[in-house]
Amino acid sequence: MKEIIIKSNNCNRLPFALNMPDTTKNIIFGAINIMKMEDLIDRRCGWCGNDELYIKYHDEEWGRLVTDDKILFEFLILESAQAGLSWITILRKREGYRKAFHNFDAGEVAKMTAADVERLMQFDGIVKNRLKITSTITNAKLFLDIQKEFGSFYNYTLSFFPGKKPVINHLKSLSEALVSSPESDAMSKDMKKRGFKFFGSTICYAYLQAVGFVNDHLVDCFCRDKI
């Protein structure tokens, strides 16, 4: 659930949060946000609120199984960029990321150089974080390696699921939402060993939700039956 990993706009101003790691802050303050949310708004998961972009994403993409490796790579880039930030921030910059990273072509991104990093540090269409930009290039190379080893990144992702089947959860309330799972723990651990950056278990779980390997639509959400 996206809001679980969203940082409250004011959390850094609270004294007890000053020395708290970003991931911890995201979980704690996201959980606080969820407690304040309605579970359902207009028969859809309440985390998307009334934001039109969020609603479109929720209705048309979130939780729908993706088998196309190009789209899986797109979400790998976007979820990694999200680390420490809100998902809506990244969604609003999605087209900027598309332009910056060769329409999410992993082969082309893997060829990017230090000069490209410097160029993107001046590009307002993305989050200008040098470590995240360089890690995107590194992750693209590792993504290609996985494709060679497993035949596809889809096959690789599915290998972490019992019976190689996506998980369908039965959440009645946003308060029941998880921030990680045994599958995200195992997958992120393996990816870390391979050299991937900005893809810990919390981000990995959000990724699995986004691309439909985990269905966390609330049981009363109208989108649930359409997936």
Image (cartoon, grey):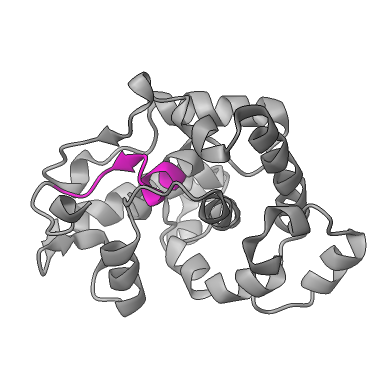
Seen at 33% across and 29% down, the residue is 165
Q: Is residue 199 left or right of residue 111?
A: left
The front one of 170 and 2 is 170
Task: Locate residue 82, reporting x and y percent.
Answer: 54, 56
Q: Please indicate whether residue 89 sits to the left or right of residue 115 in the image.
A: left
Q: Residue at x 74, y 53 (%)?
A: 107
Q: Is residue 9 visible?
A: no
Find residue 121 and report its image quarter. Answer: bottom right
Image coordinates of residue 144 in percent, x first then y, are: 71, 42
Please give the range of residues in magenta: 206-218
Indicate whether 167 appears above or below 134: above
- The correct choice, above or below, for 126 with respect to 75 in the image is below
Residue in the image at 52% along x and 28% along y: 187
Residue 162 location, quadrant = top left
Viewer-side residue, 1 vs 140: 140
213 vs 36: above or below: above
Residue 13, relative to residue 145: is it above or below? Answer: below
Q: Residue furthest top?
A: 162
Please identify the quarter of the rendering in which residue 200 is found: top right
Does the magenta segment cover residue 168?
no
Percent x, y of residue 105? 67, 59
Q: Residue at x 65, y 37 (%)?
A: 147
Can residue 17 be seen here? yes
Residue sticking out furthest to the front: 151
Tell how many labels: 0
Q: x, y (%) of residue 169?
A: 21, 36
